[in-house]
Image (cartoon, grey):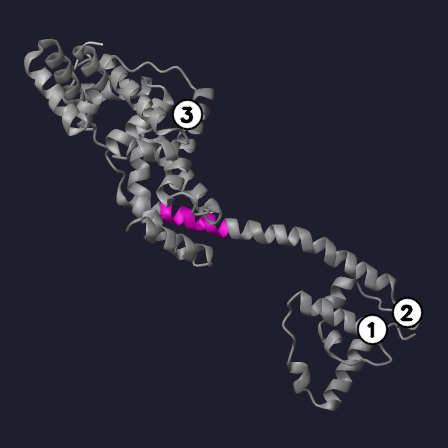
Amino acid sequence: MNICEEFKNRLIDYVENHLSEQEYKRYYEHLRCCRQCQKEYGEVKKLYKILDTDEVVLPEEAFFDDLRSRVRREKMRFRSSFLQKLMRIFVPIFAAAIILLILSRPETTVEIAVPTSALIADREIASLSLSGVIDEELIEQMSIVDNYLSFEMDETIDELTSEEQAVLVEQLYEKYGNGD
Amino acid sequence: MNDDEDILLVREFKDGNTRVFDRLFEKYQVSLYSICYRFTRNDSDARELTQDILIKVYRNLKQFNERSRFFTWLYRIAVNACLSFKRKQKHHALHYDPPPQTQPMDERVSMKIAIDNALKKLPQRQRISFILRHYEGYTFNEIGEIMGITTGAAKANHHQAVKKLKVLLKEWV
């Protein structure tokens, strides 16, 4: 390979300054006396100069601000989709557990003539000791479900006097118990 | 902010402080947009692509395992997004003829159009190598890491790109 071909192959490295000092000197000396290589070199230099004029006009600052809030919204969507996945796993488990609770009630349990959802909503039932009205085991299991669902316990029940609690128990009994 | 700082921010993010993502966002937003613009040669595509990349980065940040430098990992996502974005565009590509020119164009404008057309004609991987090398200033070793190719292949892509650009822009050279 003659030096012109060699230089042609290394021309980009020469322009981008990727040669050893020794190589650089060798091609530099060659370039001084070779018109053809000077022409090649000049063209690549000019090409780089033209390409350097290609400036990117950045979007307005509002674009990046808006983009940042879109990514933040994505964060929230991403989090909620994660919660949705969790819900998809746990909701059937809860439903199955509740059905099992109902089916496995002992014979002595008082009939409750209300939907299960209403029973769960009335969290006082789980927090009151309704001995003889509702089965103890059911109350305990309901409390577990209640805690698992992370409902806040209604502390106002504890603040009631024993007479007020008795009235509440009677009302609950009338509302949910069928009197068996 | 160097790569060590990036890694610290990523660790903080993994520990649950997702607010630190904003700092990474601010650091790389301009560079990512520039790469996307230079790749697509279109502002609207570049905006869309930048958004896709940043969302993808956010979603996958917890999977960053520190086996590579952070910017390498980030730009790899960007490069893959660029390559698949173009594929998507090709799929829906419509033929477009620019409107006929009634007045002579400003030289700078016509040069910009020539550069646009020349860069668009480069094969995608050569275009990416050229953008990362020429405009972003990465070494061939870094470009190889970003693109998942050898340093030699990155250099060859870049050299091929320069040679093609020289032909495509011969009227200007």
Q: Is residue A109 left or right of residue A172?
A: right
Q: Is residue A39 above or below residue A70?
A: above
Name the side, left or right, on which A159 lies relative to A54. Answer: right
Q: Residue at x 32, y 24 (%)?
A: B127
Going by the numbered disc 1, the residue's amino acid type is Glu
Left or right of B27: which side holds A7?
A: left
Q: Secondary structure at mark 2?
A: loop
Q: In the rendered view, tell whether residue B36 sits above or below residue A179.
A: above
B138 and B9: which is toward the camera: B138
Q: Mark 2 — residue?
A: A106
Place of residue A111 in the rendered image (x, y in percent of width and height, measured from the top left): 88, 69
Q: Mark 3 — residue?
A: B86
Marks 1 & 3, CB-CB < 8 Å contact: no
- Magenta region, residue range: A67-77
Marks 1 and 2 on same chain: yes
Placement of A162 over or under A26, stated as above or below: below
Distance from label 1 to label 2 (Cα)?
9 Å
Tag 1 residue: A137
**Please, is residue A60 above or below residue B39 in the view?**
below
Q: Residue at x 64, y 54 (%)?
A: A87
Dot 3 lies on which element? helix
Q: Are marks 1 and 2 in contact (CB under 8 Å)?
A: yes
Image quarter for residue B81?
Answer: top left
Asked whether A135 or B119 is in front, the reply is B119
Asked if the magenta segment contains residue A165, the reply would be: no
> Subunit of mark 2?
A
Q: Secondary structure at mark 1?
A: helix
Query: Is A68 part of what is drawn in magenta?
Result: yes
